Structures are given as C-alpha cells and as structure tokens.
Amino acid sequence: MADCIFCRIARGEAAAEIVYQDEQIIAFRDIQPKAAVHLLVIPRKHIENLYDLGKDDQQLMAHLMLSLPRIAKQQGLDAGFRTITNTGHGGGQEVWHMHFHLMAGDIPAMQ
Ligand code: DGP
C-alpha cells in the first residue's frame, strides 16, 4: 500500500526508531508512547487487521506471535509486558495496518 504509513516505515521510506526487524516483521517505537516502553510490532505485508487475515498468513502470524516475547526480552522486559491489538473502528483502530502494541512500565489501565 503506497500511502500506508506502516508500509512506508517497513520499506524504509518513513523514519521510525526500529528495535527489531527480519524478513517478515518489524518492531519500532510508538510515536505517542503510552508506557515507558511502547513498541509496535507489525508484519511487513500489508494486512489491515485481524479480520483481514487469510489461511496463507498462518506461518506469518505464528512467527509474529513467537517474536513478541523475544523482542520483549531483548528490551530487557523480563518481568512481563502487555500486548494490545485494536481491530476495526469498534476496537479503536487508527492505523489500518495490523499492529501489536507491546508495552511495559507504567502501562495504562485497561478500559
Ligand atoms: P491504533 O489505535 O492501535 O491504530 O494505534 C496506532 C498507533 O500508531 C498509535 O499509538 C500511534 C502510532 N503511530 C501512528 N503513526 C505513527 C508513525 O508515523 N510512527 C510511529 N512510530 N507510530 C505511529
């Protein structure tokens, strides 16, 4: 998606503070952090949200989910972390490229 901000970050066309990347996923700091550590973990592939996943995405999603604790540990988050994925307007999604918020330290209360 040419004008998707997270696609542009994944392609290196828009700046972001990247903390991890491989062939399939990329993790970078949220521009509006809501916790002491607030990362966004995304697939490079443009998938709008969880509703947009297909059967072909099983390996990608397994890789992404397995990467979350590894990225957290790389950030020194040995005591735990919170992941949030907002899906659709009803879920408060603002950026329409699937992402997992990975947060720790002064994390906001659940609503
Ligand atoms: P959500 O409501 O789940 O769609 O949250 C989108 C998050 O993306 C929000 O916490 C702010 C963050 N964000 C939006 N634009 C940018 C950007 O250009 N760079 C970075 N690093 N984060 C962004």
Image: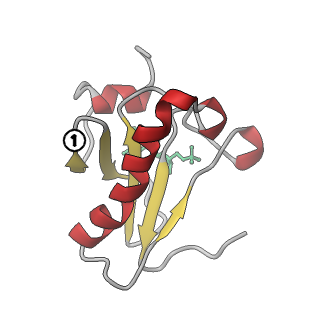
Return the residue found at the far right.
90
Residue drawn at (41%, 29%) of the image: 5
Residue drawn at (49%, 39%) of the image: 58
Q: Is residue 31 visible?
A: no
Residue 75 placement: quadrant: bottom left
Return the residue found at the far bottom.
79
Colouring scheme applied when the structure was drawn: secondary structure
Residue drawn at (62%, 30%) of the image: 52
The spot of residue 111 in percent (x, y) is 73, 69
Q: Residues within 10 Å of mark 1 (few under 14, many from 20)?
A: few
Left or right: residue 37 compared with residue 32: left
Give the total of numbered labels: 1
Q: Secondary structure at mark 1?
A: loop
Q: Is residue 34 visible?
A: yes
Residue 55 placement: quadrant: top right
The verdict on label 1 being within 8 Å of ligand 1 is no
Return the residue found at the far top.
2
Q: Which residue is mark 1?
A: 22
Left or right: residue 39 compared with residue 95: left
Going by the numbered disc 1, the residue's amino acid type is Asp
Q: Please determine whether, in this image, residue 96 is positioned above or below residue 36.
A: above
Which quadrant is home to the N terminus? Answer: top left
Residue drawn at (22%, 51%) of the image: 20
The spot of residue 40 in percent (x, y) is 41, 51
Left or right: residue 100 compared with residue 22: right
